[in-house]
Amino acid sequence: MTGEQATHVPLGRAGLRVSRLCLGTVNIGGRVDGPEALALLDAALDEGIDFVDTADIYGWRVHQGHTEELLGDWLSRPGVRDRVVLATKVGSRFGVGPNDEGLSAHHIVRACEASLRRLRTDHIDLYQMHQPDPATGWEEIWQAMGLLVAQGKVRYVGSSNFAGWQLAAAQEAARARHSFGIAAEQCLYNPLVRHAELEIIPAARHYGIGVLVWSPLHGGLLSGVLAKMSDGTAVKSAQGRAAAALDEHRDVVERFERLCAEHGRPPAEVGLAWTLARPGVTSLVIGPRHPAHLKGALAALREPLAPELEAALDELFPPLGRGGAGPDAWLT
């Protein structure tokens, strides 16, 4: 693929257009806080990244909900809210009570109202189920989501970490109720972990569901981690699960960084550009910690990969069935 890519595209079959880069906020409220967080949000918006993704539990390093509170401070500034497509999530445990998690109608409605208070807004553009809830049926889930849509508190409903069959079940249940159903699914997808190509993305494309990608650099593994570790600048990619995954995939990561150097492009740009170009992908959820980190993501959007580099990456990171890494490579 050559030529600059579109900066905004439809969210699946919805009429809503979203930026192809989505500002993920998992680092805001703990790793990046206060004025620095607000400066990062401003910088992203100034660059046209007007799609912002969060979750009610984010900010847990301080307290759950802290990230939504920071976003509320930002969104309340004059003119900001009208420019932003705002996404948050529901379903993870928030509190200690027996009904403080999951996708019951009780929890969905209460959690939405609490998120609206923290975000200091009257509506959420994309309200995402953070993960499936096998204990709750679709009739109840769609009843609760339908109520929120009818009240004007939610514009579209999304999902996250669903399997392909769960997307199908959700859409068929929505169809029976003559409702729109899921507008977007947020899933893990990158050159190293391509399992989404088997069922999730085909199901999403069949039903007209947008695909948002989280961890497009696999926790920093594809961001030039070895070079960063060598010069002492690695942060997230040198810690915890990312460090453990690096031990498992060091050989392919070394070859990836050499390939990028041969083509004269930074690894992070290459990893993001590869995922942006995949069929069915709507937007990448990126998690910068500083405005300067936006530069590589924007370059990936503006400068797609040369065909020969795409072909080399497909050999280096083969899809499942041709030797590619399976679900055991997840960083969740």
Image: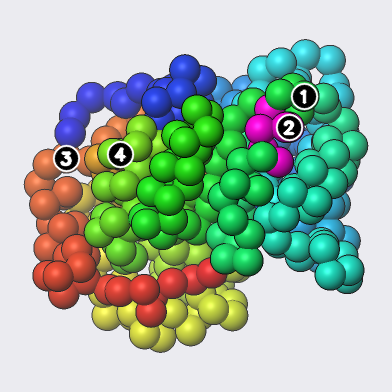
Asked whether, in this view, residue 217 is left or right of residue 275, the answer is right
Assess whether residue 269 is covered by the magenta stretch: no
How far separated are the C-alphas under marks 4 and 2?
A: 26 Å
How far separated are the C-alphas under marks 4 and 3?
A: 25 Å
Q: Residue 118: give x, y in percent of width and height.
A: 87, 40
The kind of residue tagged 3 is Ala
From which residue to which does the magenta span run?
144-149
* Residues under numbered marks 1 and 2 in contact, where contact means CB atoms less than 8 Å apart: yes
Q: Earlier in the sequence, mark 4 or mark 1?
A: 1
Q: What is the number of the mark on residue 292?
A: none
Q: What is the number of the mark on residue 306?
A: 3
Q: Residue 305: give x, y in percent of width and height.
A: 23, 41
Q: How many C-alpha atoms fall within 10 Å of the one at disc 3: few (<14), some, or many (≥20)?
A: few
How far separated are the C-alphas under marks 1 and 2?
A: 5 Å
How far separated are the C-alphas under marks 1 and 3?
A: 47 Å
Quarter of the picture holding the C terminus = bottom right
The kind of residue tagged 4 is Arg
How far separated are the C-alphas under marks 2 and 3?
A: 45 Å
Q: Earlier in the sequence, mark 4 or mark 3?
A: 4
